[in-house]
Image (tube, helix red, strand yellow):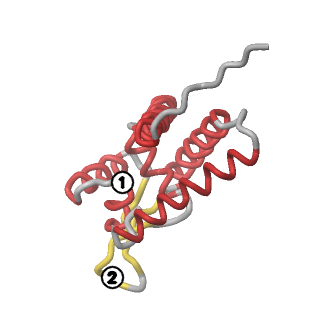
Amino acid sequence: MVTTKEPVLPLTHALVRLAHLVQQVFGEVSREHDLTPQQAQLLCLLVDGPVGMGELSRALHLEKSSLTGLVDRAEKRGLVARTRDPGDRRVCLIELTPEGTRVGVLAHEEVARRLETLAGDLPDEHRDLLAAAIGGLLTAHATRDGGAS
């Protein structure tokens, strides 16, 4: 019996290809919901509750002016609203509107479902190892960058 083994990609190549694949999933899902990929990412980040502009800037890797434009466009579509942080009125929080919640939850669940499907054939121990490795990379990055992820 002849068995062939998939060639192992160098780590950096594998990570770049994975990043492209995740971006492709966001692109597909965003088109289905009449969103840009960045709007889909924004809504997915807000599904768990309001987030400050500084944190969104770091999470989306956008300059403040670019983030302001993204939030402005999402706000015009009725997907997000700006509110003041009750603990610090200088801080502007971005939160989902009811329509933004509806679209954001749908987009988030669809992205998660598609990513889950991509990993569906991996044995549980490989999935756990991959999740732990990615978690470790994200934690190390956040630590180095002072909390940015």
What residue appears at the point 34 percent right and 61 percent down from the top-left corner? 58
In this view of the protein, can residue 30 be seen by the observer?
A: no
Q: Nearest the camera: 111 or 131?
A: 131
What residue appears at the point 57 percent right and 40 percent down from the top-left corner? 111
Amino acid type of the residue tagged 2 in the rendering = Arg
- Residue 56's x, y, as percent? 37, 61
Hey, which residue is sitting farthest right in the picture? 1
How packed is label 1: few (under 14 Cα within 10 Å), some, or many (20 or more)? some
In this view of the protein, can residue 120 be seen by the observer?
A: yes
Foreground tag (1 vs 2): 1
Instruction: Tell me the distance, in whole angstroms, between the alpha carbons under discs 1 and 2.
Output: 23 Å
- Residue 39's x, y, as percent? 40, 45
Q: Is residue 1 above or below residue 9?
A: above
Quadrant where the image shows the C terminus: bottom left
Residue 46's disc is: none
Tell me which numbered mark, 1 or 2, is placed earlier along the sequence: 1
How packed is label 2: few (under 14 Cα within 10 Å), some, or many (20 or more)? few
Hey, which residue is sitting farthest front in the picture? 1
Amino acid type of the residue tagged 1 in the rendering = Leu
Residue at the spot of label 1: 60
- Residue 95's x, y, as percent? 45, 62
At mark 1, the secondary structure is: helix
What residue appears at the point 57 percent right and 46 percent down from the top-left corner? 108
Residue at the spot of label 2: 89
Position of 113 compared to 27: left or right? right
Q: Nearest the camera: 110 or 6?
A: 6
Using the rendered view, name the quadrant where residue 90 is placed: bottom left
Q: Nearest the camera: 95 or 8?
A: 8
- Residue 65's x, y, as percent? 20, 56
Using the rendered view, name the quadrant where residue 36 is placed: top left
